[in-house]
Amino acid sequence: MSEALKLFESLGGDLIEAEKSQMFGKPCFKIKGKAFVCFFQDEMVFKLSGEDHSKALTLDGAKFFDPSGKGRAMKEWVQVPFLYAENWSNLTKSAHNYVIEKYKL
């Protein structure tokens, strides 16, 4: 298991009510059935909005999540390289909070 995957599992599993699941065949964490983070290409992907979304996209190598690779990016989702693993914890919490607020969970 890669260091990136270990960190993903640790961060997602530490959050209250987070459930390990799958999204597009990739590992993810959900809260009440709504995904907020996933793991793709040895990087973490976060569902974000507002300033958190904008800041995540400024990280070198960060990009909109395009799981199909066909130019159909999921605009709320930002894929962040392992190079920025020190940011993953805060981004995980932001994604978790965003999904709770968005869906009134």
Image (spheres, rainbow, N blue to C red):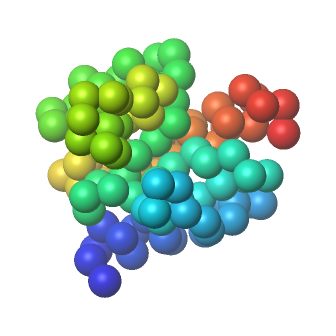
The image quadrant of residue 43 is bottom left
Q: Position of residue 22 (x, y in %)?
A: 55, 63
Residue located at (16% from left, 37% from top): 61
- Comparing 68 with 85, the one in front is 68
Write the residue at 39% across / 58% down: 39
Q: Please, which residue is most extreme toward the right here? A: 105
Q: Residue 78's image quarter?
A: top left
Q: Is residue 7 left or right of residue 94?
A: left
Residue pictured at 48% horizontal, 26% vertical: 76
Task: Choose between 29 and 71: the one closer to the eye.
Answer: 71
Query: With 102 as the anchor, is 25 left or right in this view?
Result: left
Q: Quadrant of the N terminus?
A: bottom left
Q: How many marks?
A: 0
Closer-to-camera residue (58/1): 1
Is 31 on the left or on the right of 7, as rendered? right
Identify whether 54 is placed above or below 104.
Answer: above
**x and y percent of residue 84 in the render?**
25, 48
Point out the image quarter for the C terminus: top right
Residue 91, placed above or below residue 21:
above
Q: Quadrant of residue 95?
A: top right
In the displayed structure, would residue 81 be above or below residue 19? above
